Amino acid sequence: MGAGAAQTAEPKGASRAFVKDQARTTCHGRPQRRRPDFAFIMANQNNWLLAAIEPDVRARFQPRLRRTSLERGEVLLSPGETVHRVYFPETALIGLISAMPAGDAVQTGMIGRDGALGVFEACGTRQSAFLCEVLVAGEAWVMAADDYRRLYETSADLRVAVHKYVEILLTEARQFVACNALHSVDARLARSVLEALERSQDSRTLPATQETLAQMLGVQRTTITAALSQMQAAGAIRTARGSLEVVDPAVLEDAACCCRETLKIARAEIYASDEPVCDA
């Protein structure tokens, strides 16, 4: 658990109703008149899943949420560990790391304000399949898994948001298979840095070591060192011990692989869709 003091204050901006009326039904024939306004949520600086919850439901469960500070390098879950808490990052960034028996490890996912850690496992096996470690220190909301399950059952809008989040994660995973096989390390690194900054709400500075970046891309540290040197020579970034600063975002965007734009479009389409969601 993070070292920060726990709080129960309501997330900023939570007073607004993040919903819009829709005269639609679910695939089970139940009427669904309220749907999250994802256009507003995506522009919001709070955790997107929490922002999607109906105001009255959020108010009821708010005392069950605690605000905490997550420290860089903090291990939140280990493989096989029971999921007792669900984390909703706001400024923190969490990495999902898959380790091999020989000791090699690679990052297979990132969780920022667009999602949460434990939202699937808490309603499924109750166990973590990955090592879950804080990549970027920051703030998050945390809720006991039992309370989250009750919240999930109560909030139709949260179920819609989680369903879309799952669809986005599957889309990303499939795209990254192609990306890892076809695109250069330089292009993949530029995309990964930009996405990490967006998910942690810091548009300029990423507090990550070269070892972390190597694990993120599944390459050797020396490969990352060479890629960072090229980016710095191009004026895109400035490196320091344990962090990098984006000096020219446009140059970094140009260096990123086409998967960045492909995934931007896919995420926008998934969130914009008004099609009814099963079991929501």
Image (cartoon, rainbow, N blue to C red):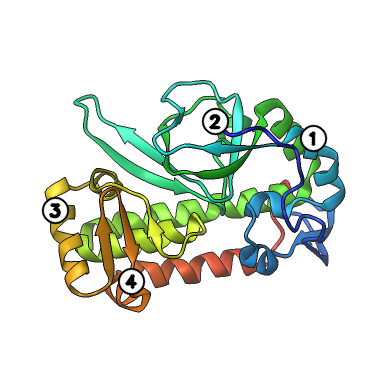
Lower position in the chain sequence, tag 3 or tag 1: 1
Q: Categorize mark 4 by other alpha carbons within 10 Å: few (<14), some (14-19), many (20+).
A: some
| Residue type at the position of mark 4 | Val
Structural distance between the alpha carbons of marks 2 and 1: 20 Å
For marks 2 and 3, give the one nearer the viewer: 2
Q: Provide the residue designation for mark 1.
A: 63
Lower position in the chain sequence, tag 3 or tag 4: 3
Lower position in the chain sequence, tag 4 or tag 2: 2
Structural distance between the alpha carbons of marks 3 and 1: 47 Å
213 relative to 80, above or below: below
| Label 4 residue SS | loop
In the image, 212 versus 148, the foreground residue is: 212
Tell me if I can see residue 278 in this picture.
no
Tell me if I can see residue 246 in this picture.
yes
For marks 2 and 1, give the one nearer the viewer: 2
| Label 2 residue SS | loop
Q: Provide the residue designation for mark 2.
A: 3
Lower position in the chain sequence, tag 4 or tag 1: 1
| Residue type at the position of mark 3 | Thr
At x 42% / y 35%, what residue is drawn?
A: 133
Q: Provide the residue designation for mark 4.
A: 247
232 relative to 121, above or below: below
| Residue type at the position of mark 1 | Pro
